Image: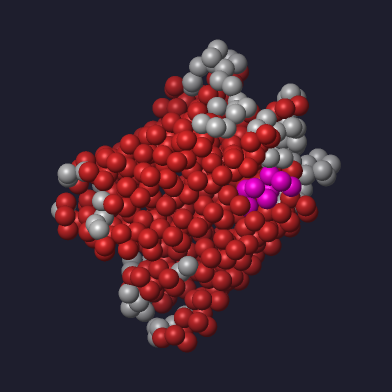
Amino acid sequence: MTSTPPAARPGGPAPLHDDRRLVLVVAILASFVVGLDSSVVNVALPAVRTELGGGLVVQQWVVDAYLVTLGSLVLVAGSLSDLFGRVRVVTWGLVVFGVASVACAVAPTGEVLIGARALQGVGGALVTPSSLALIVAAFRGGAQAKAIGSWTAWSSAAVIVGPVVGGLIVDGIGWRWIFVLTAVPIAVTIVLVRRVTGDVAADRHVHVDVVGAVLAVVGVGGVVLALIEQQRLGWGSPAVVAALVLGVAALGGFVPWERRVTRSGGAPIVPLRLFRARNFSVGNVATLSIYGALGMVGFVVTLFLQEVWGFPAWVAGLATLPPTVVLLALSTTVGTLAGRYGPRRFMAAGPAVAAVGALLMLLAGDSPGAIGYWTSVFPGLVLVGVGIALMVTPLTSAVLGSVPEAEAGAGSAVNNAVARIAGLVMVALAGVVLGGEMSVGGLHRAVVVMAVLLVAGSVVSAVGIVDPGRRGSATDA
């Protein structure tokens, strides 16, 4: 890679070192608020349908509108973070998210609610890569890995808190108040983030890559839209085909355009030189495989518990919590150890352990009962959780620790986009794996696919990831 100023190197001094504790609190709160909103919405869908009408279509788009804008804009947001500063972009994102939350709370119709949810996705896209980039800017070495572990743990806590708190609010005072729930901590976070100093200064001589931004939004958005809508309309639908063709065409033109911008000395949405860093390129390949598997886990197992074993929705929700609880308990410790010993062994071991957990669920049969759950699904999910905990923080540290601090926003955005798209693709393909409906055989096929993807991620990590400090390491392709 070309040389960079000491302050911009992955191992150089941290520009935000004077505000490290504050930076960590802000990054955690920002991600927690976004994650909390995502996790509480699902429990409100029946109440939304009852009050606003629109049937299943409105319910789907209350969720999907957020996913489409978030997934399509996250790359652009990462570039904006590097150009204009993480503090500024996080603040923008929180303001947009807060305004959108209020709009959701007062939405008079399903269409208005869907539009407000799409706007929330814009805010979430601005917040997600920038909050993690703040940590990369403030911490170095082992301290960075530990901080990322704390960020991962508390961000995951939103998944646990969300459905429980959201259910109580929906049943107690109404679904609209779940959006007020997120607006209040947003206001607190905005006050705190304005106290962070020493951020990357905006370069007013560099212009945003507008064409690259459009190609990224249309490309990712078109593919994501097609994957979501095909579940409702089918692959033969003209709307699905048009979205897919347009998305693929835009993505096909994205890389050549980014090369052109780079050669002209501009600021591309995705600096392609990031992929010269070995840990960045290998880490994203591992992310594609591992997060594809994880995207299917919660989806398939939750369906199985409800549709085959007949668990009530809230019981199924509790039954699938073990991975999140284990991740919350272990992430900070694993982050500390990975910072001391390097990420490779953790990234190799974690997916392998999770694969064993997935295969344990082959023991699940037609009969539910406490014994069936406790001897098949529960131990399988616990091992999946242990595997995720061993892998997530080291993976994030390996990927972001290999890029210059000045481009941490783009690096975070790329990794986040890869993870989200991988999960979306596997959920979209779940119908093929399940054979059209949920069954014991479908579950068995799904967990085998999960295990294969996890093992592939383990092998890629073991062979390709290099611990920092070794020769030919993280910065070499």
Question: Is 448 in front, or is 268?
Answer: 268
* Residue 84 pos. (x, y %): 53, 24
Q: Residue 151 location in percent, x, y?
A: 58, 49
**Residue 398 shows in the view:** no
Left/right placement of residue 80 relative to residue 316 reads: right
Question: Farthest residue in the right direction?
Answer: 471
Helix, strand or loop for the magenta stretch, by majority: helix
**Picture layout, residue 153 above or below residue 195:** below
The colour scheme applied to this rendered structure is: secondary structure
Q: Position of residue 382 (x, y in %)?
A: 56, 71
Residue at 83% over, 44% down? 470
Q: Residue at x 63, y 42 (%)?
A: 21
Quadrant containing the N terminus is top right
Residue name at image x 41 percent, y 63 percent: 299
Say whether residue 306 is magenta.
no
Judging depth in this view, the residue of 283 and 314 nearest the camera is 314
The residue lying furthest to the top in this view is: 205
Query: Relative to residue 8, is residue 200 drawn left or right?
Result: left
Residue 46 placement, left or right of 318: left
Magenta residues, as a range? 142-149
Return the x and y of residue 184 as percentages of the image width and height: 38, 45
Classify residue 46 by image quadrant. bottom left
**Residue at 74 percent of width and 47 percent of height:** 142
Res 303 → quadrant: bottom left
Nearest the viewer among 351 and 450 is 351
| Residue 168 seen | yes
Q: Is residue 146 magenta?
A: yes
